[in-house]
Image: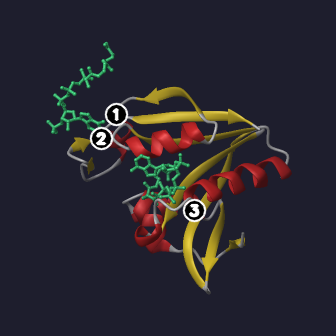
């Protein structure tokens, strides 16, 4: 698995996970960004940021649209967990929208448990309303696992 750290942020991919570039800019320079390449092309990415003592958060994770559903997302999460563990963190967190049903499924399959809800996070922090599958994204579902 060729997943490496980079300072050349794949913004097109990052925007798939987070539709506001301003929001990405707010965390990207304080974070570490990793990419998966296939045939010299970036096909997936994740971004991790230490948020509290002992705690790392996956701020962004995305796979190129044509390659989604083939297990790359799962590989990226497993790599993020391993990287965080090697860096000495004991807890990893991820947050996603109430409307992101496949993502909630994936994160729980990767060992995360739901630990809370930031009610109205997306309606308060994002300029444009976000809809997924006809459902408005309003609340942030927060998940965590000990590693
Ligand atoms: N419905 C049900 N299950 C699904 C779906 C779906 N639509 N999509 C994937 N899964 C399942 C797979 O079946 C697989 O489970 P399995 O191992 O039991 O077969 C599991 O989820 C893993 O799927 P992957 O193929 O590894 O997922 P993928 O490579 O598509 O990556 C990701 C997932 C990153 C969410 C990708 O789809 C993506 O880039 N989406 C757009 C951006 C996005 O939403 N990013 C997350 C935002 S939240 C954040 O960034 C913190
Ligand atoms: N994935 C995504 N969307 C779905 C799914 C699914 N698996 N199933 C239904 N939907 C959507 C439909 O598309 C529809 O949305 P739309 O109006 O935008 O098209 C909406 O949900 C309503 O679907 P219905 O066809 O009305 O749902 P159904 O008649 O299947 O009833 C129910 C839902 C009661 C959950 C039924 O599937 C069932 O009896 N399941 C087994 C028992 C169960 O789980 N009960 C709930 C337990 S919790 C509780 O009882 C408090």
Residue at screen point 48% across, 65% down: 14
Q: Secondary structure at mark 1?
A: loop
Residue 32: mark: none
Mark 1 or mark 3: name the one nearer the start of the chain.
Answer: 3
Please provide percent x and percent y for residue 73: 56, 57
Say if disc 3 is inside 8 Å of ligand 1. Answer: yes
**Dot 2: few (<14), some (14–19), or many (≥20) neighbours within 10 Å?**
some
Left or right? Give the position of 11 relative to 90. Answer: left
Compared to 32, does 124 lie above or below?
above
In space, the residues marked 2 and 3 are separated at their CA atoms by 30 Å
- Closer-to-camera residue (70/49): 70
Decide: is 10 above or below 137.
below
As helix, strand or loop, the secondary structure at mark 2 comes to helix
* Residue at screen point 56% across, 52% down: 59
Say which element carries label 3: helix
Is 34 drawn above or below residue 88 in the view shown? below
Q: Position of residue 116 (x, y in %)?
A: 51, 26
The answer to whether marks 2 and 1 mark residues whose Cβ atoms lie closer than 8 Å is: yes
How crowded is the residue under tag 1: few (<14 C-alpha within 10 Å), some, or many (20+)?
few
Q: Disc 2 beta carbon < 8 A from ligand 1?
A: no
Residue drawn at 38 percent across, 44 percent down? 100
Which residue in the protein does label 1 denote? 120
Which residue in the protein does label 2 denote?
Answer: 123
Residue where numbered disc 3 is placed: 72
Mark 1 and mark 3: Cα distance apart in space: 30 Å
* In-image side of 34 versus 62 (left or right): right
Q: Position of residue 64 (x, y in %)?
A: 46, 70
Contact between labelled residues 3 and 2, with CB atoms less than 8 Å apart: no
> In the rendered structure, are the residues bearing label 1 and label 3 in contact, judged by CB atoms less than 8 Å apart?
no
């Amino acid at each position: 698995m060729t997943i490496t750290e980079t300072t050349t942020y794949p913004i097109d991919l990052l925007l798939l996970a987070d539709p506001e570039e301003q929001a990405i800019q707010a965390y990207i320079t304080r974070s570490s960004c990793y990419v998966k390449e296939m045939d010299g092309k970036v096909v997936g990415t994740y971004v991790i940021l230490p948020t509290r003592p002992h705690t790392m958060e996956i701020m962004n994770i995305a796979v190129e649209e044509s390659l989604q559903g083939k297990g790359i997302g799962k590989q990226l999460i497993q790599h993020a967990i391993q990287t965080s563990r090697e860096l000495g963190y004991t807890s990893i967190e991820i947050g996603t929208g109430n409307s992101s049903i496949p993502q909630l499924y994936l994160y729980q399959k990767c060992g995360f448990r739901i630990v809370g809800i930031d009610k109205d996070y997306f309606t308060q922090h994002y300029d444009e309303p976000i809809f997924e599958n006809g459902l408005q994204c309003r609340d942030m579902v927060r998940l965590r696992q000990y590693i």
